[in-house]
Image: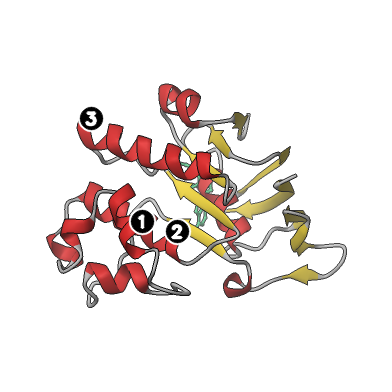
């Protein structure tokens, strides 16, 4: 089993949370705006502390309130691609990609899969939103994560780039090297990419 999640957290005046288990592959989280999808990814990454519950990935406890386990983000081996790419502005694309990479031998492969090989010497500020998003996915993959969290990875892309990025994500999914949790609002995207779909909130 890849993910075993049962958590709630306070957010503002309300509460968000989820309870699900999944197998390998790509799991899509769907839910209305404000339902708590990003909050859930933040809890898994260790950026938001749950009020209760547990988060286990591949049998490893990242958080367990009852057992007093709460690994810091840097020990969770999470590749997190945020809604905004959050590249380091003072590093070129190549250095962004290699930030946190255990070795640089996979750089060319990842750059080809994500169609960013021509961008390696560019500065982040010169990239389009879709290009920056693909660089962020590449950076996450090169850090050899134990799990990959994608928060609406295709939302800012035009149809052609969206199709390319969808194929790239499908290739990562099919390699089965890393379980993926992906948030999307797009039903067609969810059905095409997801091995399963988990509703969040409501
Ligand atoms: N830092 C914060 N402080 C207080 N409340 C917050 C904070 N961040 C989010 N919330 C609230 O928590 C709830 C869940 O937000 P979250 O961003 O997790 O939802 P979401 O499902 O990812 O939404 P969207 O699809 O619009 O991105 C919302 O009601 C939001 O207003």
Residue corresponding to mark 1: 110
Q: Which residue is mark 2?
A: 141
Task: In this rendered view, identify the residue nearer to me: 149 or 51.
Answer: 149
* Residue 70 falls in image quadrant: bottom right
Distance CA(mark 3)–CA(mark 2): 23 Å
Looking at the image, residue 186 sits to the left or right of residue 65; the answer is: left
Q: Is mark 2 within 8 Å of ligand 1?
A: no
Q: Quadrant of residue 20?
A: top right
- Foreground of the two, 116 or 51: 116
Q: Can residue 88 be spotted in the picture? A: no
Disc 3 to disc 2: CB gap under 8 Å: no
Q: State yes or no: discs 1 and 3 in contact (Cβ < 8 Å).
A: no
The mark lying in front, picked from 3 and 2, is 2
Which residue is disc 3 drawn over?
159
Q: Are marks 1 and 2 in contact (CB under 8 Å)?
A: yes
- The percent coordinates of residue 175 (x first, y second) are 52, 44
Residue 60 percent location from the top left of the image: 76, 61
């Amino acid at each position: 089993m890849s993910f075993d999640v049962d958590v709630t957290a306070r957010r503002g005046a309300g509460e968000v949370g989820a309870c699900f288990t999944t197998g390998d592959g790509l799991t899509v989280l769907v839910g209305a705006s404000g339902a708590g999808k990003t909050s859930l990814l933040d809890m898994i990454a260790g950026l938001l502390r749950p009020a209760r519950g547990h988060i286990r990935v591949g049998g490893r406890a990242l958080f367990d309130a009852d057992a007093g386990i709460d690994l810091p983000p840097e020990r969770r081996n999470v590749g997190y691609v945020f809604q905004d790419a959050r590249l380091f502005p003072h590093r070129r694309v190549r250095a962004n990609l290699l930030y946190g990479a255990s070795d640089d031998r996979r750089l060319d492969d990842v750059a080809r899969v994500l169609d960013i090989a021509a961008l390696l010497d560019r500065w982040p500020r010169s990239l389009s939103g879709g290009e920056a998003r693909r660089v962020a996915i590449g950076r996450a993959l090169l850090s050899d994560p134990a799990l990959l969290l994608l928060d609406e990875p295709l939302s800012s892309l035009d149809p052609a780039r969206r199709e390319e990025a969808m194929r790239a994500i499908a290739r990562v999914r099919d390699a089965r090297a890393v379980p993926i949790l992906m948030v999307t609002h797009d039903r067609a995207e969810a059905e095409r990419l997801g091995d399963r779909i988990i509703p969040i909130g409501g």
